[in-house]
Image (cartoon, helix red, strand yellow):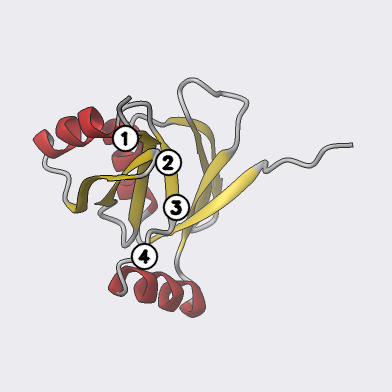
């Protein structure tokens, strides 16, 4: 029997704003959008993996969640890492759309990484293979 990650969370300060950024800018697709009172069960998947791991855009309403998120952001620590085939090209595309990066594409051995601000209180790392 194998175990796998089904859903992972990212705390956001505004679910609607996060949904717009993660879908319109980063290209994720909605998997579930279920109203739950004041908030929603709002999960996204990669466009090439509709049955893959879901990213839950979870409200940071709990004081501990907000403090955790703010501390990571203040220290420049990404809360998640997303894989992309060509980090340099995606960085250029996102930068042209006005996305703010805290780290430009940087080769680190066999990978290239960049770090962006998701506009919802998080830093997100992009990672992909270094050019051959």
Residue contact at pointers 1 and 4, CB within 8 angstroms: no
Q: Find disc 3 in the rendering and name its residue.
A: 80
**Badge nearest the viewer, 3 or 1:** 3
Horizontal side, residue 121 vs residue 82: left or right: left
The residue indicated by pointer 2 is 82
Q: Which residue is pictured at 29% across the width and 34% down the height?
A: 87
Which residue is farthest right? 1
Q: Quadrant of residue 60?
A: bottom left
State yes or no: discs 2 and 1 in contact (Cβ < 8 Å): yes
Disc 4 marks which residue?
A: 77
The kind of secondary structure element at disc 2 is strand
Total label count?
A: 4
In the rendered image, which residue does mark 1 sit on? 26
Q: How far apart in space, not on screen, are marks 4 and 2 (Cα)?
A: 14 Å
Q: Nearer the viewer, residue 65 or 111?
A: 111
Quarter of the image that includes the N terminus: top right
């Amino acid at each position: 029997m194998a175990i796998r990650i089904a859903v992972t969370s990212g705390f956001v300060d505004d679910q609607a704003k996060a949904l717009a950024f993660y879908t319109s800018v980063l290209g994720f697709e909605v998997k579930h959008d279920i109203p739950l009172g004041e908030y929603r069960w709002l999960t996204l998947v990669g466009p090439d993996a509709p049955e893959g791991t879901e990213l839950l855009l979870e409200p940071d309403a709990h004081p501990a969640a907000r403090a955790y998120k703010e501390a990571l952001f203040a220290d420049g620590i990404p809360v998640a890492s997303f894989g992309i085939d060509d980090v340099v090209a995606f960085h250029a595309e996102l930068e042209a759309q006005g996305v703010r990066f805290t780290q430009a594409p940087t080769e680190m051995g066999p990978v290239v990484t960049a770090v962006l601000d998701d506009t919802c209180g998080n830093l997100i790392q992009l990672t992909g293979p270094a050019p051959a």
